[in-house]
Amino acid sequence: MSHNTYTKRILIVGGGSAGWLTAGLLASQRRDWQVTLVESKHIATIGVGEGTWPTMRTTLQKIGINEDEFMHQCEASFKQGSEFINWAKSEGHRYYHPFSLPVGYTEQVDIVSPWLGIKDKVDFAHASCAQSYWCDRALAPKTASDPQYQGRANYGYHLNADKFAQLLKQHCTTKLGVTLILDDVISVNGATEGYISSVSTRDNGELAAELFVDCTGSRALLLGEHYGVQWLSKKHILKNDRAVALQVSHNTLQCEVASCTKSTAQAYGWIWDIALKSRRGIGYTFASEYCDFEKASKQLRQYINDQGLYVHQEAQVKEITFNPGYREQFWHKNCVAIGMSAGFIEPLEASALVMIELGAQYLCDNLPESDNMMDVVAQRYNDKFKYHWARIIDFLKLHYVLSERDDTPYWQSMKSDQVPQSLTNLMTLWRHRPPKHGDLDHIDEVFSSASYQYVLYGMGFNTLVDNPSITPHINSLFKQVTQVAQQGLDAQPTNRTLLDNIAKYGIAKV
Ligand SMILES: Cc1cc2nc3c(=O)[nH]c(=O)nc-3n(C[C@H](O)[C@H](O)[C@H](O)COP(=O)(O)OP(=O)(O)OC[C@H]3O[C@@H](n4cnc5c(N)ncnc54)[C@H](O)[C@@H]3O)c2cc1C
């Protein structure tokens, strides 16, 4: 094994959200490395991926983009969590998974047990989180005087994915010194010990680097095609593998802009409904084992009609095919895959962009300075991200397992078949006591036990505890939620009002 010290060049192949987020994080934090991105003029980006997590606020700050510029350029709106409609039963049921933590969670107070005693009066998300009340009224998580990236509650965004990649591209190339090459990569060239030495492009010759980031989407040109690293399909656990999507105008530009993603269960999958300032992005993800594109498009149009929205008969429905799963390894030799090339399960809980943020940040923090570090860093990265993907599968499967629906073979299968043992074990535990911090092993879990609490109790899961009486302290916590909720109801503008205000006056810098 050689012990070369690097010239420190990174080549990112692919210019979707994954490529540009990775470029932005690297170029802003690791000025000692030279970042080049090559993207095809001919191969389109996937063009979906409109819901982010609150982590995106930190990511954008690190990259150096102002919140108002981001919101304006990406037609973004504020997202405070997800609302799940008809997941537990096929009619008349809804619950929230808000981004803010349940009251008392940080101090490790068990509020679940006392809440179970009053669960017929108030659902868990409303009992424990003021944000739920604000989502009911499509309020913003902040006011016009709150500074950039700060709010009264934890929040992420809904955005236009194409415009997001454009903004990142413009920022990275003009402000962060990222070199952009518009070209097709046509082959990958190996060097000693299986390392990649360069990629060949159609018009720009060979591009050499010490580290290559494969952001070529589901094609995975470097890690998949060149190295042959296997894709581990998880379709036996989570069967959704198709989506149809449409962009629909608001009826008026004064209408409500929902501040959570609405996710409505359907016969063969579920429909996402994401409100931006100027339009809604609505799509149906479903399992091809039970439903085809035509049937899904019909159900999607029906949903849009039921929402009182109009979509032209001729409007082109975007059809997307994916194979839920992830790669056996994400980092091999001097190549790391980030984005759809590394893994994708399904859009539920919008965990794809956050995995990109996590992957790119890990890379920034652990760039190998010489090739004798490479294998160690790669191994650690692979272990960490394999763990993350397995936990994401557990958490997404939980949404189906808890359902009482059995109206179609799809639901019968999704809730009962192939439940991972790790999830079964956790659910056994939680039959006897509520989820708590230490139940999940890592400090940087993608889904914390708070998220499990929201979904479990939102779906009607029962934990068989003796309900402790509501002590004065617990009572004060429940009261705190309703007081904070009311303060927000009195003071916070609607998502729509705040977005209009930001467009006119921007957001305070400090
Ligand atoms: C139905 C659906 C809904 C989703 N919703 C969400 C969501 O709400 N939230 C979320 O976080 N995520 C969501 N995702 C995932 C999200 O869309 C992706 O994770 C994200 O867009 C990143 O994609 P990417 O950059 O990896 O790939 P792509 O967007 O496919 O980009 C690939 C890039 O590689 C380039 N390329 C390919 N081959 C070559 C070549 N030979 N030479 C040069 N360049 C090449 C292309 O030109 C393109 O620039 C969703 C995904 C699907 C399928």
Image (spheres, rainbow, N blue to C red):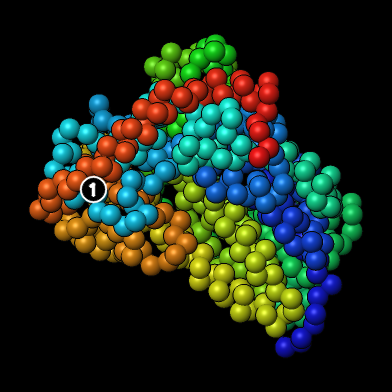
Name the quarter where the C terminus is drawn: top right
Q: Residue at x 52, y 45 (%)?
A: 54
Name the quarter where the N terminus is drawn: bottom right
Side of 69 relative to 153 (left or right): right
Q: Position of residue 497 (x, y in %)?
A: 55, 20
Q: Position of residue 99 (x, y in %)?
A: 43, 43
Q: Position of residue 470 (x, y in %)?
A: 16, 46
- Please determine whether, in this image, residue 210 is positioned above or below residue 372: above
Side of 94 relative to 187 (left or right): left
Q: Residue at x 37, y 34 (%)?
A: 484
Classify residue 381 by image quadrant.
Answer: bottom right
Q: Nearer the viewer, residue 13 or 256?
A: 256
Q: Nearer the viewer, residue 498 or 346?
A: 498
- Please determine whether, in this image, residue 481 is positioned above or below residue 333: above
Classify residue 487 by image quadrant.
Answer: top left
- Please determine whether, in this image, residue 29 is positioned above or below residue 55: below
Q: Tag 1, which secondary structure?
A: helix
Residue at the outermost left position: 466
Residue at the outermost bottom position: 1
Report crowding for label 1: few under 14, some 14 to 19, many 20 or more residues within 10 A (C-alpha): few
Q: Residue at x 66, y 47 (%)?
A: 61
Q: Position of residue 75 (x, y in %)?
A: 63, 28
Task: Give the amino acid type for the residue marked by disc 1 in the picture.
Answer: His
Q: Nearer the viewer, residue 505 or 327?
A: 505
Side of 253 relative to 73 (left or right): left
Q: Residue at x 37, y 54 (%)?
A: 106
- Please determine whether, in this image, residue 162 is positioned above or below residue 369: above
Question: Pointer 1: what residue?
Answer: 473
Q: Is residue 481 visible?
A: yes
